[in-house]
Image: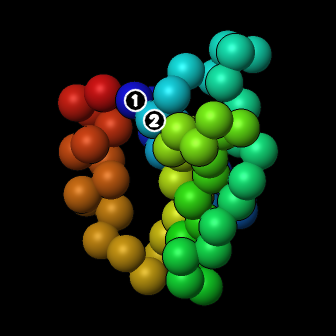
Amino acid sequence: MKITIDKEANAAYIYLLPKNGKYYPLTTITADENVNIDYTKDNQLFGIEILDLDLLDMNHIKDAQKES
């Protein structure tokens, strides 16, 4: 798992599969106005995009990033 944070876009992306060319997002489902979920062509969960990070408690995301 890898977490990236784009402060300028105020967004984060949680990669659940390696971003190595073998896996890539093909289908995106909007879970709600601030969360998009990406799946591969084989319906594997690729990653989760979180928008409007300023609405969240960033300490939880930073702690998860340190653990990965």
Tag 1–tag 2 contact (CB < 8 Å) = yes
Up-down relation of residue 24 to residue 45 (above or below): above
Residue 1: give its label: 1
Q: Quadrant of residue 19?
A: top right
Residue 67: give its label: none
Q: Which of the two labelled residues, at mark 1 and mark 2, occupies the earlier sequence position?
A: 1
Up-down relation of residue 41 to residue 22 (above or below): below
Residue that carries the numbered disc 2 in the rendered image: 16
Can residue 11 be seen?
yes
Extreme residue toward the front, this view: 42
Label 2 element class? loop
Relative to residue 61, is residue 39 drawn left or right?
right
* Residue 36 at x, y percent in the picture: 60, 66
Question: What is the CA distance from the residue labelled 1 to the residue labelled 2?
Answer: 5 Å
Tell me the quadrant of the picture where the C terminus can be found. Answer: top left
Relative to residue 26, is residue 4 drawn left or right?
left
Query: Could you say which is closer to the camera, residue 20 or residue 66?
Result: 20
Q: Amino acid at mark 2?
A: Leu
* Residue 32 at x, y percent in the picture: 55, 83
Relative to residue 42, is residue 44 drawn left or right?
left
The 10 Å Cα crowd at callout 2, few under 14, some 14 to 19, many 20 or more, is: some
**Looking at the image, what colour scheme do you see?**
rainbow
Question: What residue is shown at x 75% (from left), y 16% (from top)?
Answer: 21
Can residue 12 be seen?
no
Q: Amino acid at mark 1?
A: Met
Query: Could you say which is closer to the camera, residue 62 or residue 18?
Result: 18
Query: Could you say which is closer to the camera, residue 62 or residue 46?
Result: 46
* Residue 64 at x, y percent in the picture: 26, 43
Question: What residue is shown at x 53% (from left), y 39% (from top)?
Answer: 44
